[in-house]
């Protein structure tokens, strides 16, 4: 048992639903209790789809448990086939159905339907949504390509003379992060390179499209959480190589172009040379982000402390952008994607931080508090955490709320994606001039520490005021935090702030005050000081500045 209030991922059958709903001509029969249809709302409200997901639920009730729930499965399968006439049928179970062990997949396979029936075994008590999506996609591809797998060791057929290289885009799904627009952006890039897109899957693909996957020369593994298992299987069985670079950020997009060009056997040097990022007066760059980040208005962004958490793919990519392209300092990096923990650990070494691998939001909250960042890049959960702690935040990964499935074009991949990222990440920060005003006129009626940034709606910045000095304090609802005075006197046994020390502490700009307070208290503890005075504050500053 684990006490859980928020969960980063749904159960694995929600991942399977994401695959079925992304595809065309596929139906999913889900053995599940009455009430599990709540998951429909993810697609019709958050993703704002204009049709119901292609899912038939058996919706068994308590009274059904006395009879044969297996018969419910057979009836649902027969009716779904008759009504929707899909070209492939997925059959699986939700958490509760897993307990009654009706073997739904085998039952459906035994019904001799004239279409492929793909049974799904998704262990709900040990795996989660992204794993469920990856496993479902893999089983769909494997089942539909089973009769095409060549003998082991057969090389991929060479590309015919004069034919443009072709690639599959693997991994985009509904309820993924900005997949809809990322796919367009990558298509545009490939077109510039003279590469055709063979199949995009699962988003928009039909079973017939899946059968055409081997007609491509290579695969682009866009969202490894969903597509790496499938890309590896296609590599092993069809000899199709797959990309590893994730085209998020300008540097990573350039690496991606180079990798794709190499797999396609083409020369990308002209495109890369024409792309002159960050050069004044040069208009050839496809992304404005490098020049924006170098322009003088961005100088105040340098060294801003950022904490990054999300799925592994977006978190790793965001950390590189933060450091190399925005000039931030990465003070925390983590993921809830346990399957990709190693990748995140490797990435964290680049920033000298210890990777946080956890799906416990309280642990994440604790880590954010301890790192005292000025900006949090995370999921919807971190948005809530950052709000409570009064820290600026932008969303970079699922899970998301409805506002992160926007109507406007908003990719995060490719060169336009870098533009979107620059605007999104800078927006929640207090602007440079205001930051200076806050430092100079801290008692101004309009520009003071407790006022929200003036370009943002008046959210209670007061939460920051309460949380920053000791950001790991137990979580309080925002309303309570607003009413709580700044806890400048530490718990018993801890060094105590003198009045002048406390006054001096308040002169430090709010966005770095939490860090200064923690450092000073650590310094006082280390030196056995019971009271923190102005001198202690400056001694600590000198000590840590060395
Ligand atoms: S079967 Fe699983 S997803 Fe459905 S209501 Fe029960 S616990 Fe939730």
Image (cartoon, helix red, strand yellow):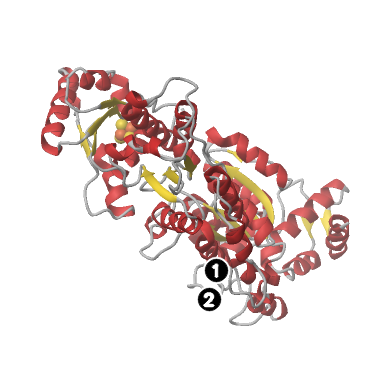
Residue 441 appears in which quarter of the rendering?
bottom right
Report whether residue 271 is seen: yes
Give SS at disc 1.
Answer: loop
Q: Residue 201's quadrant in the figure?
A: top left
- In this rendering, which labeled residue sits more in front, label 1 or label 2? 1
Say which residue label 2 marks: 455
Q: Position of residue 212 (x, y in %)?
A: 34, 37
- In the picture, measured across the screen, residue 153 lies left or right of residue 262, that is left
Q: How would you rate the neighbour count of disc 1 (Cα within 10 Å): few for under 14, some for 14-19, many for 20 or more?
A: some
Horizontal placement of 360 versus 137: left or right? right
Query: In this picture, is 509 found above or below 414?
Result: below
Task: Determine the residue positioned at 60% across, 44% down.
Answer: 334
Residue 472 in sight here = no
Q: Nearer the viewer, residue 213 or 184?
A: 213
- Ligand 1 position by quadrant: top left
SS at circle 2: loop
Residue 252 location (% of width, % of height): 60, 53
x and y, in percent, of residue 541 in the image:
84, 60
Quarter occupied by residue 279 = bottom right
Pointer 1 and pointer 2: residues touching (CB < 8 Å)? yes
Q: Mark number for residue 427?
A: 1
Q: Is residue 382 left or right of residue 280?
A: left
Residue 251 coordinates in the image, percent (x, y): 63, 56
Q: Earlier in the sequence, mark 1 or mark 2?
A: 1
Q: Nearer the viewer, residue 364 or 450?
A: 364
The image quadrant where one finds the C terminus is: bottom right
């Amino acid at each position: 048992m684990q006490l859980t209030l928020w969960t980063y991922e749904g159960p694995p059958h929600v991942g399977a639903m994401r695959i079925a709903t992304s595809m065309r001509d596929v139906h999913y029969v889900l053995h599940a209790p009455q009430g599990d249809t709540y998951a429909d709302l993810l697609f019709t409200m958050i993703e704002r789809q204009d049709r119901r997901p292609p899912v038939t639920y058996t919706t068994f009730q308590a009274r059904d448990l006395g009879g044969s729930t297996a018969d419910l499965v057979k009836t649902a399968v027969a009716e779904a086939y008759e009504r929707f006439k899909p070209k492939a049928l997925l059959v699986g179970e939700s958490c509760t159905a897993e307990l009654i062990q009706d073997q739904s997949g085998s039952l459906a396979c035994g019904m001799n339907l004239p279409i492929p029936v793909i049974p799904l075994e998704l262990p709900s008590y040990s795996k989660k949504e992204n794993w469920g999506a990856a496993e479902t996609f893999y089983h769909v591809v494997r089942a539909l390509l089973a009769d095409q797998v060549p003998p082991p060791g057969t090389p991929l057929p060479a590309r015919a003379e004069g034919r443009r290289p072709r690639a599959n885009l693997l991994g985009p799904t509904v309820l993924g992060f900005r997949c809809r627009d990322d796919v367009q952006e990558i298509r545009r890039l490939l077109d510039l390179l003279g590469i055709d897109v063979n199949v995009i899957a699962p988003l928009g693909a039909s079973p017939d499209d899946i059968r055409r996957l081997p007609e491509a020369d290579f695969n682009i593994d866009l969202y490894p959480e969903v597509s790496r298992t499938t890309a590896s299987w296609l590599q092993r069985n069809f000899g199709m190589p797959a990309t590893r670079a994730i085209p998020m950020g300008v540097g990573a997009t350039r690496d991606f172009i180079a990798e794709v060009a190499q797999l396609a056997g083409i020369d990308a040097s002209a495109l890369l040379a024409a792309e002159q990022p960050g050069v004044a007066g040069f208009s050839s760059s496809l992304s404005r982000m490098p020049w924006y980040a170098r322009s003088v208005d961005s100088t105040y962004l340098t060294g801003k402390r950022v904490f990054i958490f999300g799925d592994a793919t977006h978190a790793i990519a965001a950390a590189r952008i933060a450091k190399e392209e925005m000039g931030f300092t990465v003070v925390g990096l983590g993921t809830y994607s346990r399957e990709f923990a190693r990748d995140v650990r490797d990435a964290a070494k680049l920033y000298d931080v210890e990777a946080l691998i956890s799906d416990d939001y309280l642990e994440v909250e604790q880590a954010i508090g301890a790192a005292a960042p000025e900006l949090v890049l995370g999921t919807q959960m971190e948005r809530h955490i950052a709000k409570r702690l009064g820290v600026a935040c932008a969303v970079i990964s699922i899970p998301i709320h409805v506002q992160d499935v926007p109507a406007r074009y908003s990719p995060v991949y490719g060169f336009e994606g870098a533009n979107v990222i620059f605007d999104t990440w800078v927006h929640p920060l207090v602007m440079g001039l205001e930051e200076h005003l806050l430092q100079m006129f801290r008692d101004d009626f309009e520009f003071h520490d407790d006022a929200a940034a003036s370009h943002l709606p008046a959210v209670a910045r007061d939460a920051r005021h309460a949380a920053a000095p000791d950001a790991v304090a137990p979580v309080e609802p925002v309303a309570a935090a607003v009413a709580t005075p700044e806890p400048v006197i530490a718990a018993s046994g801890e060094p105590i702030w003198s009045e002048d020390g406390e006054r001096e502490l308040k002169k430090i700009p709010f966005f770095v005050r939490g860090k200064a307070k923690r450092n000073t208290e650590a310094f006082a503890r280390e030196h056995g000081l019971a009271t923190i005075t102005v001198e202690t504050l400056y001694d600590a500053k000198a000590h840590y500045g060395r």
